Image (cartoon, coloured by chain):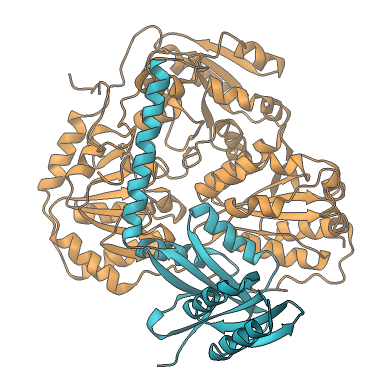
Chain colours: A cyan, B orange
Amino acid sequence: MDHTHETINKVKIETQCLRTKEFKRSDRMKSHIISTLVENRPGVLQKALSLFTRRGFNIDSITVGESETEDLARMVFIVNGDKKILEQVTKQLNKLVDVIKVRSLNPEITIKRELCLIKVKVENEQKRGEIIQLTDIFKGIILDVGENSLTVEITGNPSKINSFISLLKGFGIKKIAKTGSTAIERDV
Amino acid sequence: MRGGEAIIKALKEEGTDVIFGYPGGQILPFYDMIYESDLKHILVRHEQSATHAADGYARTSGKVGVCVTTSGPGATNMITGIATANIDSSPIVAISGQVATSLIGNDAFQEVDMIGITMPITKHNYQPNTPEIIPSIIKKSFEIASSGRPGPIVIDVPKNVQEGELKYYEKDLFQTPGYNPNLKGNIKQIRKATELIKSSKKPVLLVGGGVIIADASKELKELSNLINAPVTTTMMGKGAYPEDDDKALGMIGMHGRKAANLSIEECDCLIVIGCRFADRTSCSLDNFNHTKIIHIDIDPAEIGKNINIDIPIVGDGKQVLKSLIFEIKKNKYKFSNNWIKKVIRMRTDYYPKLNYDDYPLKPQQVIKEISEVLNDDTIITTDVGQHQMWMAHYFNTNKPRKFISSGGLGTMGFGFPAAIGAKVALPEYDVISVTGDGGFLMVCQDLATIKEYDLPIIICLFENRTLGMVYQWQELFYGKRFSHSKLGNYPDFIKLAESFGINGEYVKKAGETKHAVKRAIKSGEPTLLNITIDKSEALPMVPPGCRLSEIHGEYKTEKP
């Protein structure tokens, strides 16, 4: 019995330690934008992702698509972590043979965009008008009009999209599909 | 030419003269093609042994080791060996068979996603989908495996690709623009390091396996002499600097030598080369001496990963050391020898005791006798556990690539097959596999291999009928509850060896090891020495989380 208690205590202490560690880390947690140029081959995304899981890095979002160069793709990761984590993420990504270039983008001069599709409930004509008006204000586009619903496309930075979503919540949101952020630095 | 033949041709062009392997269904076409080729193949008795043998071959010769297995279970049996090579930065190319491309994804017989499985434990991996791409893949694999920070590469070859006819044989069908290891250190950083070394009063060199891989032993010695700094090593760095030398303090870490651990605690400038600050080396990252640290490593990701570094230098150990020596010489800096004198005294005072005439035998005495018989060129491979730490602690290695052991992964069953690889790579040298009764039994089937290929390896089996390291931890940290760490009285290892046609000898008393090893070397035949040692013998150790100077357990020294 004693032994079991001991073990339990040990586990408790360990969990506590872990928590304080996490807490300490989160003190300096920040969201970072990492832009990566990779060879456009099957398995590259998996390699990058398996690296994130294995090293315990937290990803908020990933976007992948073709780049300006043929055969090369660009991946944009939004990563949460302190400076040390950011350094490890970039270094470990750089080690992958398929990865050509890794850059942590300067948030002050970076344009960040994501695309979001929202299907929202329409109860009556008046509500429809309101939604169309809101969409207009947020520079969104109505993609589809159904009998009881509207599908809206909106692009922008995550905070704009989030505030649009919270405005639509009152109407009843049926479905949301988001792409995650992609980003590019301004020429300064 | 068919795909399999292209593999053979490309391997030979890369300088491969021998491969270790085990055939099976999906690699049959390749095996049919080596039937008539002059590529030497060593048939091991378990796929795991093939990878460890290729690893041992690579670590002792510096060349890329190659192993081949079939798909599915054959491929997964390689995983342990691949992971071992990965964490110890050993260049191997592991070729696995795969089901035909048309069947991939169908859960076909003996199909496993080898590429997916090995992603986190390889430097890179390939699955050729046409026979034409094979020569380029082999060429790239050897290049990537052996350059920069070396590591294992997996090539997963579908059966139809092995059989398919090549329309042309071309070796540069693709490039790897993302792979350019940085070899030359940044000269500004090197100059900063020079200044720091100059201003330090108590510099210490800490050397990891990177120095051996970079072939920088000569430069290391020159630097140590130039700045009057003692040399400590990690276990992987053993042999980078001759340990018989006065300035060599031996291994640091959890089971490190006292003088080495103390010197790390006391130094005011730590020059670290090719070492990744593993937890077994540093014991506690928080309590590690936070003095000024210069870290030279070819892998930028290792710098600052575990310990904050003052002066990072990314580059090849040999090239960076050369520039560092050049800068110091150019500035004509002079270094006092007060510190080194103190260190040498410390080395003598804390030199571990080796002489015991106890019965049952003490491992220290056995190691002393082994080292008396051997010369500096003898290759020692160890398994994992107590015997490994005894060897790392008490045995002096004087030349690089002569102490082969599984470091990062701590793979039991590594030592004996690695000795096979070593003997195949360098048949002119004596190879001794020091192993424990636990780890040896995991791979004892390969006694058949050494008999079959007449590889005169000497197995020094430290027999204590326990899983010694586990036993020691249970004694220290788990209230002497020896849960499943006693091995019982079977097998009789000599009878086991005899059944494979291998000579064996029991060693029980002080003084016997020496003669037994001598006889074994003279016989020129594979031999197993069953050395019965005291099972209560434990190692002095630094418990995890403690400072390097907090050595628990009695540290017996040669000087009373």
Residue B388 falls left or right of residue B347 = right
**Residue B343: percent from left, percent from top:** 17, 40
**Residue A98: percent from left, percent from top:** 60, 68
Q: Residue at x 35, y 21 (%)?
A: B476
**Residue B99: percent from left, percent from top:** 84, 51
Indicate the quadrant where residue A5 lies.
top left
Residue sitting nearer the eye, B101 or B321? B101
Q: Residue at x 30, y 17 (%)?
A: B355
**Residue B93: percent from left, percent from top:** 65, 52
Residue A182 falls left or right of residue A91 = right
Residue A67 visible in image? no
Residue sitting nearer the eye, A97 or B374? A97
* Vertical position of residue B243 compared to residue B102: above or below: above
* Vertical position of residue B345 compared to residue A160: above or below: above
How many numbered markers are drawn? 0
Pick the quarter of the image with the N terminus of chain A: top left
Residue A65 falls left or right of residue B349 = right
Residue sitting nearer the eye, B294 or A62? A62
Indicate the quadrant where residue B194 lies.
bottom left
Q: Residue at x 52, y 70 (%)?
A: A77
Farthest residue, direction bottom: A188
Residue A45 visible in image? yes
Pick the quarter of the image with the C terminus of chain A: bottom left
Indicate the quadrant where residue A141 lies.
bottom right
